[in-house]
Image (spheres, rainbow, N blue to C red):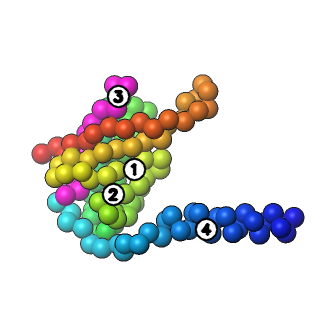
């Protein structure tokens, strides 16, 4: 049993920890690039909104809504992107972003990646 735990621990440290540490550091971001209400539509027609607020350095508060889902979370912005839940927000240009959301089909249990473009409402 100890060998299994050792193997699992080693695999976790080499895969998970190395992928989350990254080579760049967290640095303060320009809040005007992120702050505000973002909206978009997934390929299946579902709409979403993402409100980014209270940006302080590289930290921000977000509120994500999409047909039946409402999520509040504090996020860390790094390399032009941040993650919340099963979703990743990546800034692509001023006022434009890409949203990638991992969705689990409740009927089959399979997962797929939903990708959409978001625009910052002015």
The image quadrant of residue 11 is bottom right
Using residue 12 as the reference point, say whether residue 76 is left or right of it: left
Seen from the viewer's position, the closer of residues 4 and 44 is 4
Q: Which residue is mark 1?
A: 88
Residue depicted at 75% across the width and 65% down the height: 7
Q: Which residues are magenta?
A: 33-45
Residue identifier under label 4 = 14
Q: Secondary structure at mark 2?
A: strand
Residue 119 or residue 98, whichever sits in front: 98
Mark 2 and mark 1 in contact (Cβ < 8 Å)? yes
- In the picture, which quadrant includes the C terminus? top left
Q: For residue 43, which numbered disc appears in the image?
A: 3
If you read the primary sequence from the N terminus, does the residue marked by circle 2 or circle 4 appear first? 4
| Above or below, comparing residue 33 to residue 27 in the picture | above
> Which residue, given by chain and number where applicable, does mark 2 sit on?
81
Q: For the residue labelled by badge 4, is the local secondary structure a helix, a strand or a loop?
A: helix
């Amino acid at each position: 049993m100890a060998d299994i735990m050792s193997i699992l621990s080693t695999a976790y440290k080499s895969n998970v920890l190395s992928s989350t540490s990254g080579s760049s550091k967290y640095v303060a971001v320009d809040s005007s690039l992120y702050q505000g209400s973002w909206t978009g539509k997934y390929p299946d027609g579902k709409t979403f909104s993402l409100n980014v607020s209270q940006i302080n350095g590289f930290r921000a508060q977000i509120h994500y809504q999409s047909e039946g889902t409402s999520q509040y979370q504090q996020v860390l912005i790094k390399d032009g992107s941040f993650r919340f839940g099963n979703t990743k927000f990546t800034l692509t240009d001023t006022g434009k972003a890409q949203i990638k959301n991992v969705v689990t089909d409740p009927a089959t249990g399979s997962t797929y990646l939903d990708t959409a473009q978001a625009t910052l409402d002015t």
